[in-house]
């Protein structure tokens, strides 16, 4: 049976019975963007049998600090036009701070090969922190407001110019687990990675502790507004940033991704229904962004 409708609009009686397995690709950039996970949870609540399988069933939102002076200077350069004091007789410098603020609000989306490209491998300052989302138990309301506190122990001194984020999705079967990773150290995918720059970088030393917090608030653009805070408790230093995740600086020309490591064949390898010669009732959910409040 094929139904062409938003999952939110499908009536219970339209489905013959609850399903054994729910398969979907509700994963946005940095996991949460586009807010497709909410449709996945609604499908679970309305149509999945108790104890049924979900693929993916969990995901990790991963965060790591980075140092990239070239990218930081690029942000500043993009706002340098507004430093002009005589643009055809007009003084534009009164807008320079606002212009810089706008550029730093933009996340940078780009795919990096962690083995060869300049970014996370050679400029990573600490191991990533992880925020686990369990799709079998989380609620729609929990996905609308996400508050994630984390801590890093720095093993190389330098300037923290911001944080990079990506995700890993878990497909847990009865005999094996498959991990879809969008890490810069894994084979590239079309999800890329996102980086959020701080207007005021933080200077760190080896062994220093960095504490941070990310607040994601869902908005009507099918995305999130984000607030980032990084702190150095021992020296009472702090840097903050606010970001519009929908307004992304796309940079797709650095590394060409080939998303060949995630196939339906691999999904089929991990689906196992412990029943005696019965055919599982599977729902393949094609998730596209639906209007959100």
Image (cartoon, rainbow, N blue to C red):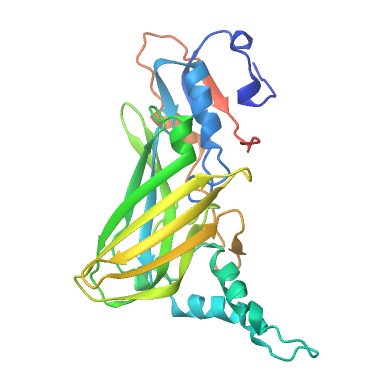
Q: Is residue 238 left or right of residue 15?
A: left
Image quarter (top left, top right, bottom left or bottom right) of the N terminus: top right
Q: Is residue 187 visible?
A: no
Residue visible at 47% across and 15% down? Answer: 280
Quadrant of the rendered structure where residue 107 is? bottom right
Q: For residue 203, what is the image quadrant?
A: bottom left
x then y, percent, for residue 257: 54, 58
| Left or right placement of residue 83 versus residue 179 in this view | right
Where 250 sits versus 219, above or below? below
- Asked if residue 198 is positioned above or below residue 31 in the image, the reply reads below
Which residue occupies the foreground of this view, 260 or 23?
Answer: 23
Q: In x, y percent, where is residue 17?
A: 53, 8
- Name the residue: 63% across, 38% down: 289
| Residue 71 versus residue 126 in the image, above or below | below
Q: Is residue 187 left or right of residue 283?
A: left
**What residue appears at the point 60 percent right and 60 percent down from the top-left corner?**
248
User: Front-most of 111 and 264?
Assistant: 111
Image quadrant containing the C terminus: top right
Residue at the image point whose x is 43% and y is 35% from the top: 142
Q: In the picture provided, is 245 more to the left or to the right than 119?
A: right
Q: Position of residue 169 (x, y in %)?
A: 41, 42
Can you give x and y, in whole percent of width and height, for residue 103 in the image? Answer: 58, 70
Q: Is residue 161 visible?
A: yes
């Amino acid at each position: 049976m094929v139904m062409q409708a938003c999952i939110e609009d499908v009536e219970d009686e339209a489905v013959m019975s609850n399903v054994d397995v729910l398969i979907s690709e509700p994963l946005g950039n940095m996991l949460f963007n586009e807010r497709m996970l909410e449709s996945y949870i609604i499908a679970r609540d309305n149509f999945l049998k108790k104890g049924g399988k979900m693929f993916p069933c969990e995901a990790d939102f991963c965060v790591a600090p980075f140092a990239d002076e070239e990218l930081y200077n690029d942000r500043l350069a993009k706002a340098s036009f507004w430093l002009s004091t005589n643009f055809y007789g007009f003084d534009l410098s009164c807008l320079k701070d606002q212009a810089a603020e706008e550029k730093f609000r933009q996340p940078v989306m780009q795919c990096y090969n962690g083995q060869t490209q300049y970014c996370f491998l050679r400029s990573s300052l600490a191991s990533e922190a992880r925020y686990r989302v369990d799709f079998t138990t989380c609620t729609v309301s929990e996905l609308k407001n996400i508050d994630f506190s984390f801590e890093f122990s720095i093993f190389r001194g330098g300037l923290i110019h911001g944080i990079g984020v990506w995700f890993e999705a878990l497909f847990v079967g009865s005999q094996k687990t498959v991990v879809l990773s969008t890490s810069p150290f894994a084979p590239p995918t079309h999800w890329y990675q996102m980086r959020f720059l701080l207007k005021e970088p933080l200077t760190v030393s080896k062994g220093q502790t960095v504490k941070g917090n990310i607040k994601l608030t869902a908005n009507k653009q099918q995305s999130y507004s984000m607030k980032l805070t990084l702190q150095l408790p021992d020296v009472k230093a702090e840097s903050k940033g606010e970001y519009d995740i929908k307004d992304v600086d796309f940079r797709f020309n650095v590394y060409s991704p080939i998303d060949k490591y995630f196939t339906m064949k691999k999904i089929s390898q991990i689906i196992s229904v412990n029943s005696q010669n019965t055919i599982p009732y599977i729902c393949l959910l094609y998730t596209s962004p639906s209007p959100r409040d």
